[in-house]
Image (tube, helix red, strand yellow):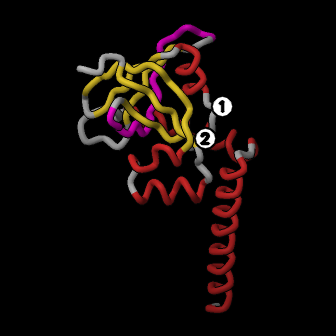
Amino acid sequence: MATMLAALAGAVVLGVAAVAAIYVLGMRARSPLVLRPLIRLQRAVINPRQMRSAGQPGAYASVIRHRGRVSGRDLETPVDAVPVEDGFVIALVYGERTQWLRNVLASGSATIVRDGRAVEVDQPELVPMRDVEAGFTDGDRRGFRVLGVDSCLRVRRADPVG
């Protein structure tokens, strides 16, 4: 009986390790086979839960408010907006083809809500991670390296005084 339990436990551990390896390799390769289901999960489950506290004081996630380039609707997406001297940077964990990113680049502006404050931003540009990685924590940088995150969105405060 103990041998069977040990074999089952070993199989479970190997299964979890295999799934983790597929996830990491798929993220690094930006494989649609990994990204599509992950983005669906993000939209359906994770984002609605994060939006309950995103943008509020002490919350991990900020909110980026943007206008849909096709629908014209006002949209909100939770992101990790890291403040820098003249605005914010947002690591592009899912790559450069996400809908919120395409909307912000198309409109040229957005609003970041962080720690309970809304900041109008503009001049969106894609920048290499190496140019802005100092703004992220050591743990974030390690995670980005593992997942192959190599670019960020940089936005600047529309009103530098505010």
Question: Residue at position x 72%, y 50% from top?
Answer: 29
Residue 14 in magenta stretch: no
- Residue 87: image location, x then y, percent: 36, 30
* Type of amino acid at the residue the image marks with label 1: Arg
Tag 1 near tag 2, CB within 8 Å: yes
Quick check: can you spot residue 46? yes
Residue 71 in magenta stretch: yes
Which residue bears the numbered disc 2?
94
Camera-nearest residue between 53 and 98: 98
Where disc 1 sits, the SS reads: loop
Determine which quarter of the picture holds residue 13.
Answer: bottom right
Q: How crowded is mark 2: few (under 14 residues within 10 Å), some or many (20 or more)?
A: some
Camera-nearest residue between 57 and 109: 109
Quick check: can you spot residue 53? no
Which residue bears the numbered disc 1?
97
Question: Residue at position x 47%, y 28% from top?
Answer: 77
- Residue 19 vs 61, above or below: the answer is below
* Type of amino acid at the residue the image marks with label 2: Tyr
Q: What residue span does the magenta drawing correspond to? A: 70-85
What main secondary structure does the magenta stretch of the protein show? strand
- Residue 130 vs 22, above or below: the answer is above
Question: Residue at position x 44%, y 27% from top?
Answer: 155
- Residue 128: image location, x then y, percent: 56, 42
Where disc 2 sits, the SS reads: loop
- Residue 161: image location, x then y, percent: 24, 20
- Residue 2: image location, x then y, percent: 61, 91
Distance from disc 1 to disc 2, alpha carbons, whole Å, reads: 8 Å
